[in-house]
Each structure stands twice: as structure tokens, then as C-alpha cells.
């Protein structure tokens, strides 16, 4: 599956976005949990 996220910084590939999400989960587990609770569809592709 190809997934791209557009941001002010440009376009991230699915691998880059995966890395960002994993880093976010490590650095801020509470914030990551809130993201999952607020928008479960946005992280569904990670599984």
C-alpha cells in the first residue's frame, strides 16, 4: 500500500511517515495514545 502525507515540509513516503509515527510513539506515548483515540483511522494502516 502506498501512502503519502502532505505537509508544509513536503510529501512523506509511507516509510518516512511510519518512522515519524514510531518516533512520536516513543517520544510522547501519551500524545500518541490521544491520536489513536481521536483518529483511529489515521493509524490503522500502521498495523
Image: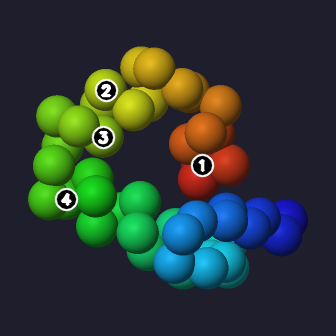
For the residues labelled 2 and 3, say whether their Cβ atoms are less than 8 Å apart.
Answer: yes
What is the x, y in percent for residue 36?
Answer: 43, 30
Residue 13 versus residue 4 in the image, above or below = below
Picture colour scheme: rainbow
Residue toward you, 6 or 46:
6
Q: CA distance from mark 4 to mark 3?
A: 9 Å
> Quick one: 1 or 8, which is closer to the camera?
8
Q: What residue sits 42% from the left and 20% below the top?
A: 37
Q: Which mark is residue 32?
A: 3
CA neighbours of label 2 inside 10 A, class few (<14), some (14 to 19), many (20+): few
Residue at the extreme front of the image, as rendered? 8
Q: CA distance from mark 1 to mark 4?
A: 16 Å
Image check: 21 left or right of 40?
Answer: left
Of pointers 4 and 3, the one earlier in the residue sequence: 4
Q: Secondary structure at mark 2?
A: helix
Between disc 1 and disc 2, the foreground one is 2
Marks 1 & 2, CB-CB < 8 Å contact: no
Total count of labels: 4
Q: Quadrant of residue 2?
A: bottom right
Query: How far is mark 2 from mark 3, CA to CA?
Result: 5 Å
Front label number (2 vs 4): 2
Tag 2 residue? 34
Q: Residues within 10 Å of mark 3 (few under 14, many from 20)?
A: some
Q: Earlier in the sequence, mark 1 or mark 2?
A: 2
Pointer 4: what residue? Answer: 26
The earlier-in-sequence mark between 3 and 1 is 3
The answer for how far apart the CA atoms under marks 3 and 1 are is 15 Å
Q: Is residue 37 above or below residue 26?
A: above
Whole-number angstrom distance, CA of label 1 to CA of label 2 = 17 Å
Q: Are marks 1 and 4 in contact (CB under 8 Å)?
A: no
Amino acid at each position: 500500500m502506498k501512502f503519502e502525507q502532505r505537509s508544509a515540509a513536503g510529501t512523506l513516503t509511507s516509510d518516512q511517515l511510519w518512522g515519524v509515527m514510531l518516533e512520536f510513539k516513543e517520544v510522547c506515548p501519551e500524545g500518541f495514545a490521544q491520536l489513536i483515540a481521536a483518529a483511529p483511522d489515521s493509524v490503522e494502516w500502521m498495523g
